[in-house]
Every structure is written in structure tokens, then in C-alpha cells.
Amino acid sequence: MFKFEKFIKAFAEKFNWIAAGAVVFMMGLTCLDVFLRIFRKSIPGTYEFIGLFGSVVISFSLAYTTMAKGHIAVEFLVQKFSQRRQSLTGFFTDFFSMILFVVVSWRSFLYAMELMRAGEVSLTTHFPIYPFVLGIALGCGLQSLLLFTDTVKSLKGAMK
């Protein structure tokens, strides 16, 4: 299990770097578009690209944020539990979160295939949308795998 977890965490770090690159791209594109408006020019599709790359930022940073325990957690009640009960609570939380992200990943993949078959593109730039929905599926899939490792660790803690 340790090698699998290490592998998943390495992937989460790489995905997080892709998300960071998408943020830099979005920031650069927005700044350039604002600057060009001084000269009464603009970049067509800026709004579309910001939305599409926003999906990359969110979905590709999910697993790393989970790994770094960066999500908001309400622990004031759980901290009063015994160690075993805390592990059990963690198990159920991680397990149901994993199920949720498996479903989101699976449905996103199916939706991406549907968009690809239909040839769905963005309105202004005619850029294909399905790769971004596939990115959501990948990010949520990675999140599921990370939550699986957390579920196993919580179960081990609850068994002790």
C-alpha cells in the first residue's frame, strides 16, 4: 500500500504543477487582454479560455489539496472523540467522499465522450471542450485514488 500511496502522491504533485501553470496562463491572458484594450483591441475567446482553464485549475489541484490537508474541516467536535472513534469518523468521511468522486469522474468521462462524438466546441474560438471535461474526470479520478488510500489508513486506525 505504501508504494501505491507514494505513486498517487507523486501524481498529485504533478497535477498540482499543471494547475499552477493553468493559473499563470489565465493570469497572463487576462493581463494581456486588458492591456490590449488600451489600444481598442482584445483577444477573442478570453472569457471562454478563462472558464475552460478554470476547470483545469480546480480539478487538477483537488488531490494535492487533499494530500496537504488544505480543505476546510470542522474538527472541534471530532477532536473530543477517542482516537478510535476519530479514525472511524475519518473512515466514513473518506469512504463516502471517495464514492462521490468516483461517480463524478465516471460521469465526467462519459460526458466528455458524448461531447467528443457530438463535436461540441466553444462558441467564439471553436475550441473543443471535451479535453477539459476529460481533465475533470482525471482530476476527480486521482482524488478518488487518494481518498482510497486515506480510507484504508483510517480503517487501519479504527481497527487498532
Image: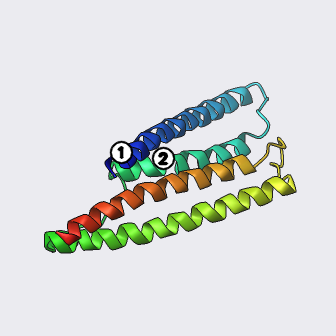
The residue labelled by disc 2 is 61
Q: For the residue labelled by badge 2, is the local secondary structure a helix, a strand or a loop?
A: helix
Whole-percent x and y of residue 135? Answer: 62, 48
Identity of the residue drawn at 54% across and 51% down: 139
- Seen from the viewer's position, the closer of residues 66 and 72 is 66
Quarter-of-image position of residue 109: bottom right
Position of the C terminus, as image quadrant, is: bottom left
Residue nearest the viewer, comparing 127 with 33: 127
The residue sitting at 37% across, 49% down in the picture is 5
Q: Is residue 51 left or right of residue 2?
A: right
Q: Nearer the viewer, mark 1 or mark 2?
A: 1
Numbered tag placed on residue 3 in the rendering: 1
- How far apart in space, not on screen, are marks 1 and 2 (Cα)? 21 Å
Where residue 61 appears, as percent x and y from the top left, is 48, 47
Q: Answer left or right for 110 relative to 9.
A: right
Residue type of the residue flagged with mark 1:
Lys
